[in-house]
Structures are given as C-alpha cells and as structure tokens.
Image: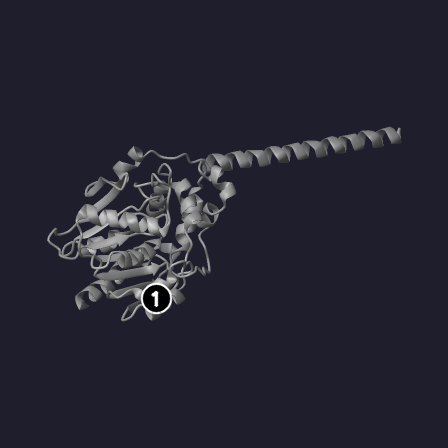
C-alpha cells in the first residue's frame, strides 16, 4: 500500500509540476502577446498626420522628386534668410522656439529632411551626407536663396557645414548646434538609434515601435529629462510612424560614415557660431572644442545643463546667443 501511495503521490507531483510549467508558459505567452500588441505600430499615411503636424504656415512643396514639408516665415525682404536643418529622427518642429523668437525681424525657413518628418523617404533611397547636400541645394534653388544664415543640429549640423563648403557665397554665416562632423565617440546612444542600426531587426521594427522606447530615446538626449513632455514624445512617436520613415532611418545609419570629411572642416571661412550643451552624451563637448580649433575665428557658447538638442530644450537661452552672434556680423 505504501508503495502505491508513493507512486500516486509522485504522479500527482509530476502532474502538478506539468500544470505549473504549462501555466507559466501560458503566462509568458500572454505577457508576450500583450507586449507585442502594445508595441504593434503600423505605418501611418501622410494624410493622417497632416492635420496635426502641418497646419498653416506649413506647406507641402515639390522639390527634388519629393513632397517636402516646409515652413517659411518672417519678412520676405530679409537679405539673409535663416535656414534651419534638424537632426536624426527630428523634424522642423524642433526649431519652434527659435522661429518664434526670430520671425518678427528675420525670414526663417525650415523643412523636414528626407527620411524624417512628413517629407519621408527619398525616392532614390540615398541618405549619404553628399546626397543631403544636394537636397539642400535644391531647396535653396526652390526658394531662390543667394545669401543665407545656415544652422543645423547633429546630422543637420554636418549637412550645414558641408553645404557651406559646397555653396560658396550662398552661406554667409554658419551656426552649428551639437553638430556631427568628426568620428563619433558617444558616451550614450538612444535605444531607438541602437535598434535602428541592427539590420536583422529591420523587418520586425517596421511593424513594432513601443512608445516607451521613443520616450527613452528623447529623454536620453536631454540634459534634464524632466523637460520631456508627453506632447513632445507624441510628436516624435507619430512622425517616426510616417510611412517609410523607419526603413529610411535604418538606411540612413548604414550609409553614413561619420568623420569621413572631417579634414574639410578647416576650409570653412564664414563667421561661425558653435552652440553646445555640456551634457551632450551623443556628441560630447570635446567635438565642440574641435570645431572651434578647426574653424578660424569661430565662437563657442557652451550651455550648462543642456543636452544634445539645446535649441529644443531651452530655446530662449540658446536663441539669445544666436541673436548676439547675428548682431556682431
């Protein structure tokens, strides 16, 4: 009898263990299903985003084979319009604060670069810095710009200084905001950028985008993450979902070689303002000092407590430096 009871007890224990394993697997499957469901994020058609992110004075204009999201504000008789170029995964909205402060006296032109914002992918799927310079030239021709102040942040900063060299006489002043240009030496990289560079994940990430990952990425580039609002995260999240942008971002990373043209920076001869956040962990402040050493006569303004997008994080403080620089020249 004792042996039979032992066998029955053993079977009961095995049965209980099996039920526990099956129950655990079911719980894991449920968690994964819920997680995937919450991260499931198909592309959004441009038409779905226009009402929220392209009200007046936005325009959608045909340039270089694309329909480009543009804002052109301020007095049309300005002899040196200010052109603003955003960085990776950003949009023309990143310059809202600067534009509001400048447009009463200056003409301010900004647009979503190919692969980002409402402009979306380039039809030729080329995202090298050289190709972006060609695009900026096309935009200058569209607006008939013969003289300008050209400003850029991060990727937009690299495009700005390379455009200044490629369009001598059309860029009179240069403003570099935490600009790329030298070989990258990041102290921290946003999780969204890391994942976008893993080619094996590309097919999956074209359908998944956890909002929390976008929030983490935005907070990573701010000096003070507490300044990141839900509305700001919504904008970055929604515009990342613009149809084709996620695939284009991966291509952009694969095609960009940072520092490939760094030796040309010393050729810049226009008045240059270098604006940097001292808490930038993506392109650290040492790069700002390198720009200052390499560009003759350039000015550097370092902002304590600000991160990689100081113009967005504290528009009032940073645009004050810009106004001072413009007044000097």
Name the image quarter holding residue 27.
top right
| Residue at the image position 44 percent from the left and 48 percent from the top | 254
Q: Is residue 314 visible?
A: no
- Observer-nearest of 300 and 298: 298
- Observer-nearest of 140 and 215: 140
**Residue 284 in the figure: left or right of residue 29:** left
**Residue 325 in the figure: left or right of residue 21:** left
**Residue 48 in the figure: left or right of residue 250:** left
- Observer-nearest of 44 and 120: 120
| Residue at the image position 50 percent from the left and 36 percent from the top | 36
Q: Is residue 120 visible?
A: yes
Find disc 1 in the rendering and name its residue. 291
Quarter of the image containing the N terminus?
Answer: top right
Q: Position of residue 220 (x, y in %)?
A: 42, 54
**234 over 281 or under it: above or below:** above
Q: Position of residue 150 (x, y in %)?
A: 24, 57
| Residue at the image position 24 percent from the left and 47 percent from the top | 138
Name the image quarter holding residue 115.
top left
Q: Secondary structure at mark 1?
A: helix
Total count of labels: 1
Q: Position of residue 49 (x, y in %)?
A: 30, 37
Q: Residues within 10 Å of mark 1 (few under 14, many from 20)?
A: many
Quarter of the image containing the C terminus?
Answer: bottom left
């Amino acid at each position: 009898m004792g042996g039979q009871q032992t066998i029955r007890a053993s079977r009961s224990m095995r049965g209980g263990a099996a039920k526990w394993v099956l129950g655990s697997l079911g719980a894991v499957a449920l968690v994964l299903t819920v997680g995937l469901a919450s991260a499931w994020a198909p592309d959004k058609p441009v038409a779905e985003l226009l009402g929220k992110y392209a009200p007046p004075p936005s325009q959608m204009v045909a340039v270089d084979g694309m329909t480009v999201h543009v804002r052109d504000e301020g007095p049309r008789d300005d002899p040196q319009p200010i052109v603003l170029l955003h960085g990776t995964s950003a949009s023309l909205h990143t310059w809202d604060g600067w534009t509001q402060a400048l447009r009463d006296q200056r003409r301010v032109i900004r647009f979503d670069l190919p692969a980002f914002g409402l402009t979306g992918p380039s039809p030729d799927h080329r995202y090298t810095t050289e190709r972006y310079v060609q695009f900026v030239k096309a935009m200058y021709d569209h607006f008939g710009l013969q003289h300008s102040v050209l400003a850029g942040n991060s990727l937009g900063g690299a495009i700005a200084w390379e455009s200044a060299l490629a369009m001598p006489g059309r860029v009179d002043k240069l403003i570099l905001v935490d600009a790329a240009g030298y070989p990258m030496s990041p102290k921290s990289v946003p999780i969204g950028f890391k994942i976008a560079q893993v080619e094996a994940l590309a097919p999956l990430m074209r359908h998944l985008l956890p909002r929390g990952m976008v929030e983490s990425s935005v907070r990573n580039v701010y000096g003070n993450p507490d300044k990141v609002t839900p509305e700001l995260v919504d904008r970055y999240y929604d515009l990342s979902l613009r149809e084709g942008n996620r695939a284009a971002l991966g291509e952009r990373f694969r095609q960009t070689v940072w520092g490939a043209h760094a030796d040309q920076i010393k050729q810049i001869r226009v008045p240059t303002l270098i604006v940097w956040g001292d808490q930038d962990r993506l392109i650290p402040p040492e790069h700002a000092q390198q720009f200052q050493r390499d560009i003759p006569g350039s000015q550097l303004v370092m902002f304590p407590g600000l991160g990689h997008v100081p113009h967005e994080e504290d528009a009032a403080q940073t645009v004050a430096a810009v106004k001072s620089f413009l007044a000097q020249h």
